[in-house]
Image: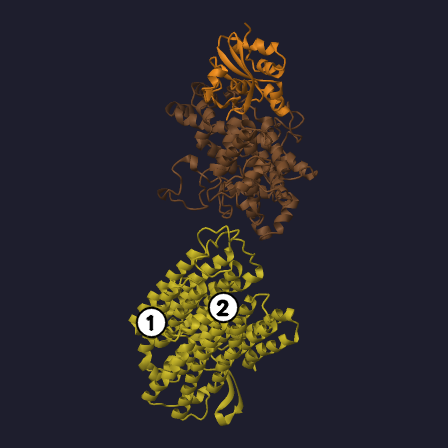
Amino acid sequence: MATIVDIAIDNPGFETLVAAVKAADLVETLQGHGPFTVFAPNDDAFAKLPPNTVNNLVQNPPQLARILAYHVVAGRWTSAQLADTSELISLEGSPIPIRCHSPLEVKNASVIAADIEASNGIVHVIDTVILMG
Amino acid sequence: MSTSLPPSTHPHADVIHRLEAGGSMLPDTPENLMQIIGIYKAYAVPMDFYWRDLLYIGERVFLQPLPFFKYFLSKKYLDRHNTYSGDRSSLRIWRGRGEAHPELTEFIDQGASGRRWPRLLHHLGHDRINMEFAEACMRSMFWHEDINPKFNAYLYTEEYKTAADKAIKAYFKGNIAMLGLYKLFPEMFLEQVRQASYYANLGLFWEVMAPVFFEMSDIYDEGGFKGVPDAMDFLVNGIFAVAGRPIYHHVYVGDECFAIIPKSAGFTWLYEAALPYVEAIFYRTTPFRGTKSYDAQLNQVPRDQADFHYGILYADVFPVGSAGIPPTLLMHDMLRFLPPYLEDYYQQHCRGEDDQLIQLGITFQRSMYNVTSAVIQALRAALYYPLDDPNPEHLLANRQFFEQQMDRLTRPEARLRDIQVSDYR
Amino acid sequence: MMLTLLIGLPLLGALAILLFPATKAKLVALWGAGIPLLWNIWLFSQFDLGNSSFQWGESAAWLPVLGLNYELGIDGLGLLMVALNTLLTWIAIYSARPDVERPRLFYSLMLMTSSVISGAFLAQNFLLFFLFYEACLIPLYLLINIWGGERRSYAATKFLIYTAISGALILVGGFGLLWLGGAEDFSYAALAETNLSLQWQVLLLVPFAIGFGIKVPMVPLHTWLPDTYVAASTPVAIMLGGVLAKLGTYGLLRFGFSLLPDGWAVIAPWIAIWAAMTIIYCAFLAIVQRDIKRMVAYSSVSHMGYVLLGTAAGNDLSLSGCIAQMVAHGLVLAILFNLVGLIEAKVGSRELDQLNGLMNPVRGLPFVSATLLLGAMSSAGIPGLVSFAAEFAVFQGSYRVFPWQALVGIVGTGLTAVYFVILLNRTCFGRLDNQRAYFPKVSFNEKAPALVLVIVIIALGVQPNWLFRWSEPTAIQAIEIVPGTQTVTLEDMGDLLLGDASSATPLLD
């Protein structure tokens, strides 16, 4: 089965995310054992951010990596499991609130495609880049 | 507009409704717009000095035991290029120049008196930028350590200590007395390094704000802003644009660079500088000596640091003028760089030139309510939902967020009510 | 002519105002007050210090049948009083609000008041004095009744009734002197030659003491004063407290002390007790006031008690002190009323509960606060300011004669500090209230009167001799008439008072 990174690369609509993961030097990490749960913002989600925000982050990989790490949670959390949870701790260290269970909303993002299985985890596609705080 | 939500019952409901409509806490009037833009311009010039000097102190003066000349900014730092402004910037976001603003360099040369005296005389005659204000802000951020947990925790890691140790040893190389002291009291030196890290932190924060304010003034002069919300939106965009800027602390001993907090530590402008700054300076700070007497035994000073409320959003600007009070120092700085239209405006009100200092202080208070509004709107956009979200539950979450923010401004000292009327000046 | 000018010039000014348009009224009035002031300053340079009798006498027959002649003359006491009058007239006119209603009438009446008061100080004929004494009621009544504040007509009427009674009593005293003493007319010289028995002297002192006691005023005859001072506008209050009150003590000195010396020696201890009571009682009243103008008014009464104490003691030191205190009191009261008026005009309140933080350097009234502080310090007898020398001389002189009364009076000085600390602490210090602190700017023109007074207060405080030298011959001459008075204390006082014997020596000349 494909890794999380492969899924992102193979599917259309994740070009920005893939570029960001590469820029942040996180490819290897996300190909590792895991398992991880990744909330993957699609291209539309990144497009909502002002252009300079992304440009600036791409120029600063450690900072970009931190934002991306906020989208990753240790363990394999299916949407069914998420329905019983109100908060997850991201790899960045900050909590991710699960604000609504049906439809599933992660912080201020809505999950538009849930439970995409990968060899080292699970991917949920979200429509907004989520930020700490 | 939240047509689907019933009106708020919050004491500041009018302000909340304005925020929900995409407005600012400051009412949208041409007079307010003129005032805040004028004061941003007056603030930007000294701020252009503050950030340069803060970085200079953090990076070069560092642990100088007798830093008599820490305010004597070197040519190198005056010419240092802003990271996001000027033609040498790798990511130019603002259109201003990279080096120090011409009004600032002129002021450093001649002072307000217009005399080209040696700099030491300008310094002693207080004909200079009041860096003490910037340092008071830095200390406030340093002291309210709970508001910046990640950054603060890093200051106590082994990594940090090792890097600091290297820098200290290099800085005092050959200075047996200081090295001996370091051996005896390592924590004392480390604490000084931590403070220097906050110098760098605040310097990097203001490096961004100075060109933002300059550009706002330019846009206004060109007739660009239509109202207060436009000015606020410009700030919101600015906040987002540089949110991911690294916050770091480099120390230079000779040509050698010691990365005490490397960029790879992942600290960002928004989380480790901007938000803590707003909390520490706009809301909390510390009760300034001289403005009022406080009796801690009568609980006039809150037991909990988080309840401090001495920032500009609460400040009583009237006692300005007593010596040595940091806000007065800032107002004194801004007084020298007021745009002509603001000077005229102050001439027409209250006591004209005699109380310009207070009038501009209150304008500054208005302008900082607008900046705080920008921060609130930015946080709303980052953590909550668009204002035109069709989902009423999302709108309710926005409402709750705004109400939560306004709760902090319900205490009697808050000036939110005052700035709603133009008579408060 | 030299002295007639002092009366005539302000009167001419009062008439001149009527010829000019209303907008020029204040300017003309300032000239009308300024020229007599300059003339007065010139008179100082011409005054013969060695001569203890009246100088520059003028005499013209008027109604010889009644014993009324136009007789003028001046001695050290009169010179100082007229100087105080001309200076405070100028200050009072300068202090008037620029937007005063019916300005031509207002300034005319002010100058007429000044002219008439000068006349009273210069008169050498009892009946002439009495005419001036009564005449000043008319312009003052109008000034209070037309331009006063709240309850002005009540205050004006009360003022009129009290002072009319005062006038009637004094007239009784004066006629008593003439008839019982068998003097040929009312001139002071004639009256001084009468030789009344002790009983008659004491009896005649009663109407004089009560009549002038109302004017000073003394407890319990003072009740008209707070109402009147508070109702009067600032310039009128300055004239009332600064100058008019001095007519009372002046009259006691001239007619009681000088003309009835034996009787005075008998009642002096009682006068001293009366003075001490006034000092203490009004000081306590001042402490409990909530209205700062009223507080200053009571303070004024309390401090007039010192003058009376000095008069009662009747030695050269206490008399010099009491004359100096009359001047000091006028200066201090004028500055205090001027500043209280400024505070009221700018802040819109005189209530202690509402005033706060005026010392604030930018939004408060820092100049007003600072000068108020100085005025209060002077009033409380802080060394280096004019009242110190005067009060010190009064106490030093009267302690020899009436130790207990003098000690009570000294306690009054302490109480002065108490109520002025209350006043200053509430009005000047503390935090300025944001809701109220949009006071208009104090212009230089508004500061000028206080500034002039500050200069005079400090100058005479640092060099009290400039004040004492004029009244010195008068004081010495006066005591020679009165039996049982002492002339010992001046030399002791020199060092104590000034710490510098050289500057004190002219006192002894």
- Residue designated by label 1: C277
Q: Please provide percent x and percent y for residue B118.
A: 58, 39
C433 sits to left or right of B118 = left
Is residue C397 shown to the viewer in this render?
no
- Tell me the amino acid under the disc marked 1: Met
Depth check, front residue: B272 or B263:
B272
Query: What is the drawing colour of chain A?
Result: orange
Is B305 rendered above or below residue C310?
Answer: above
The number of numbered discs placed on residues in the rendered structure image is 2
The percent coordinates of residue B357 (x first, y second) are 56, 47
Query: Chain C is shown in which shade?
Result: yellow
Q: Secondary structure at mark 2?
A: loop
Q: Nearer the viewer, residue B96 or C190?
A: B96
Q: Residue at x 47, y 63 (%)?
A: C458
Q: From mark 1 to mark 2, how far is it between C-alphas?
A: 30 Å
Image coordinates of residue A63 in percent, x first then y, are 55, 20
Q: How far across and how far down the image is residue B272, in percent?
A: 51, 27
Task: Tell me the brown chain.
Answer: B
Relative to B148, residue C394 above or below: below
Closer to the chain start, of discs 1 and 2, is: 2
Disc 1 versus disc 2: nearer the observer: 2
Q: Which residue is mark 2?
A: C150
Q: Chain of mark 2?
A: C
Of all residues shown, which one is farthest toward the right?
A: B222
Image quadrant where one finds the N terminus of chain B: top right
- Tell me the kind of residue under disc 2: Glu
Secondary structure type for disc 1: helix
